[in-house]
Image (cartoon, rainbow, N blue to C red):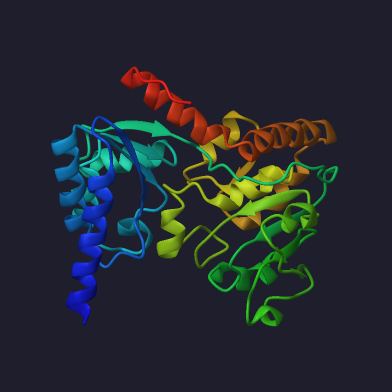
């Protein structure tokens, strides 16, 4: 039965590739899910179609499983090597792919993912020690360490977690779980925390290390809500955050209070304005559209 489904998947992919026109630009969302084929096989099939029909293949990278989950680097390389252009999260991810031997591709950097949402008003932000964290609370094992963070910093958690009661303490409140559109109006803090892994001291573990090359959608959510960011100083978006005045960077969650205390009201107001302006761009999908425009310009093509 498994062999039958594998054959069915091969035929489905081949049929889809046969329908693609010659001399076309093909965008591939990568990592490819829900297909019972290896990346090596997918790379071979896409490469065959590319050569036969003189296509330009563009990989839009969502995740690199070899870093995020520790899967095969070789399979990652074999698939992406068949692509002519690669849209990556940030310059750290660009450098990583160059480092594993993918030097012949053209790279286009997003910095932050777009977050398409209905346009609407967001809360006015004021400087305080209130920090929001939204996402998969069960996966974010560092949250159990927030109760060790003293001082005035208050963490507000948003998302699903079967054991959320164990996370609540004097400085940790649970605010509920909301849809991607609803949560934009629910975030009530002064900053949005971008953190992952198993420790409040640094972004540790496999998920924490992935932060070094990943531009998480969490950051885009906060910016769309007009929230300045708090990000790990070794994360893939730290330089972008500093360059565009979108928030503050820290090496440890214990550093947050001192960093916030060093800000003036005027500092924060400018930071919040920058965050809201960036969020407006992300709402409209401007980052991906910019990358697509650059690819078409480099190829001397036009699209409507």
Whether 287 is drawn above or below 39: the answer is above
Q: Residue 244: horizontal and vertical position, in percent? A: 61, 30
Q: Residue 6: horizontal and vertical position, in percent? A: 21, 70
> Does residue 156 appear in this view?
yes
Whether 64 is drawn above or below 296: the answer is below
Image quadrant holding the N terminus, namely bottom left
In the drawing, does residue 51 fall left or right of residue 156? left
Please report the residue visible at 44 percent of the width from the left and 42 percent of the height from the top: 89
Please report the residue visible at 49 percent of the width from the left and 46 percent of the height from the top: 215
In the drawing, does residue 242 fall left or right of residue 173? left
Q: Residue 96: horizontal and vertical position, in percent? A: 31, 43
Q: Residue 195: horizontal and vertical position, in percent? A: 57, 56
Q: Report the front residue among 297 and 257.
A: 297
Please report the residue visible at 39 percent of the width from the left and 53 percent of the height from the top: 63
* Number of on-image labels: 0
> Does residue 246 appear in this view?
no
Q: Report the front residue among 297 and 220.
A: 297
């Amino acid at each position: 039965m498994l062999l039958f489904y594998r054959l069915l998947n091969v035929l489905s992919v081949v049929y889809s590739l046969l329908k693609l026109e010659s001399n076309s630009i093909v965008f591939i969302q990568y990592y490819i899910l829900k297909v019972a084929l290896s990346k090596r096989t997918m790379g071979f099939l896409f490469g065959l179609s590319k050569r036969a029909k003189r296509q330009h293949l563009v990989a839009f990278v969502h995740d690199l499983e070899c870093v995020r989950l520790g899967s095969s680097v070789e399979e990652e390389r074999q698939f992406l090597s068949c692509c002519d252009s690669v849209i990556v999260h940030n310059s750290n991810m660009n450098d990583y792919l160059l480092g594993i031997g993918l030097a012949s591709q053209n790279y286009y950097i997003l910095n932050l993912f777009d977050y398409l949402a209905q346009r609407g008003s967001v809360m006015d932000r004021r400087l305080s020690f209130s920090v929001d964290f939204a996402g998969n609370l069960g996966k974010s094992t560092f949250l159990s360490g927030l109760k060790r963070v003293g001082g005035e910093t208050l963490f507000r958690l948003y998302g699903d977690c079967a054991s959320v009661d164990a996370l609540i303490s004097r400085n940790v409140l649970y605010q509920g779980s909301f849809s991607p559109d609803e949560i934009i109006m629910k975030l009530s803090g002064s900053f949005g925390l971008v953190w992952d892994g198993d420790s409040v001291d640094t972004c540790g573990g496999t998920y924490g290390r992935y932060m070094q090359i990943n531009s998480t959608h969490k950051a885009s959510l906060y910016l769309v809500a007009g929230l300045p960011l708090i990000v790990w100083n070794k994360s893939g978006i730290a330089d972008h955050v500093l360059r565009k005045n979108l928030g503050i960077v820290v090496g440890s969650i214990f550093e947050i209070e001192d960093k916030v205390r060093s800000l003036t009201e005027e500092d924060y107001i400018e930071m919040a304005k920058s965050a809201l302006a960036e969020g407006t761009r992300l709402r409209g999908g401007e980052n991906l559209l910019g990358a697509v425009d650059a690819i078409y310009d480099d190829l001397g093509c036009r699209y409507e």
